[in-house]
Image (cartoon, grey):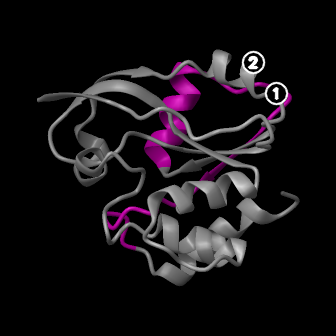
């Protein structure tokens, strides 16, 4: 099994929403970019929901999120895993959410990109009464649901945000 570490959060003090994945996949780790696999629907969904023009420029992608007060991170700080599947994650340790929320007190809505992110956060971090937590279907190509269904579920991210 490979020992892997997550990325730093993409966040600013203006962010009110946080989207959490579990751990970057192999292609994301290779490119050092969140959701880099070409078949992952994350960026396509975000561009559509935010009314933004799609781009391949990673810096622009992350800037778009921040312009809309959306932060991005992963629940898991480090783990052992072969390949990209969440089911292969072992010996996982969570990121420091206490510090993240202390530094970014405006974050009140937390969305989980898939079941693994949600369950790991629930078990290893726990829910605060002053935040809203919503589990969304995974944008991963391994989660075989039509794009339109994922888009409809993910529309929750831009409501009241």
Whether the residues at callouts 1 and 2 have beta carbons within 8 Å, the answer is yes
Residue found 43% across the figure and 29% down from its top? 76
Viewport quadrant of the N terminus: top left
50 displayed left or right of 20: right
20 displayed left or right of 145: right
Task: Give the extent of the magenta segment.
Answer: 115-144
**Residue tagged 1:** 105
Q: Which mark is residue 66?
A: none
Reply above or below: 65 against 92. below
Q: Nearer the viewer, residue 144 or 63?
A: 63
Residue found 22% across the figure and 48% down from its top? 30
Question: Helix, strand, or loop for circle 2?
Answer: helix
Reply above or below: 59 against 121. below
- The picture places residue 52, in percent across and down from the top left corner, at 66, 76
Specify whether residue 15 is painted magenta: no
Q: Quadrant of residue 116?
A: top left
Residue found 31% across the figure and 44% down from its top? 86
- The picture places residue 93, in percent across and down from the top left corner, at 40, 19
Q: Nearer the viewer, residue 83 or 32?
A: 32
- Label 1: few (<14), some (14–19) or many (≥20) C-alpha neighbours in 10 Å: few
Question: Helix, strand, or loop for circle 1?
Answer: loop
Residue found 55% across the figure and 30% down from its top? 121
Reply above or below: 156 against 119. below
Q: Quadrant of residue 79?
A: top left
Q: Nearer the viewer, residue 134 or 30?
A: 30
Q: Which mark is residue 102?
A: 2
120 displayed left or right of 49: left
């Amino acid at each position: 099994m490979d020992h892997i570490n997550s990325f730093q959060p993409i966040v600013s003090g203006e962010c009110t929403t946080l989207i959490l994945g579990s751990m970057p996949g192999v292609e994301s780790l290779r490119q050092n970019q969140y959701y880099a696999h070409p078949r992952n629907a994350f960026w396509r969904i975000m561009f559509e929901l935010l009314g933004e023009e799609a781009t391949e420029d990673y810096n622009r992608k992350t800037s778009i999120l921040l312009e809309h007060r959306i932060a991005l991170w992963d629940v898991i700080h480090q783990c052992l895993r072969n390949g990209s599947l969440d089911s292969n994650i072992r010996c996982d340790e969570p990121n420091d959410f206490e510090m993240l929320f202390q530094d970014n007190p405006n974050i009140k809505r937390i969305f989980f990109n898939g079941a693994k992110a949600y369950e790991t956060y629930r078990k290893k971090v726990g829910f605060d009464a002053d935040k809203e937590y919503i589990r969304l279907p995974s944008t991963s190509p391994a989660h075989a649901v039509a794009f339109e269904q994922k888009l409809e579920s993910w529309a929750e991210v831009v409501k009241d945000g």
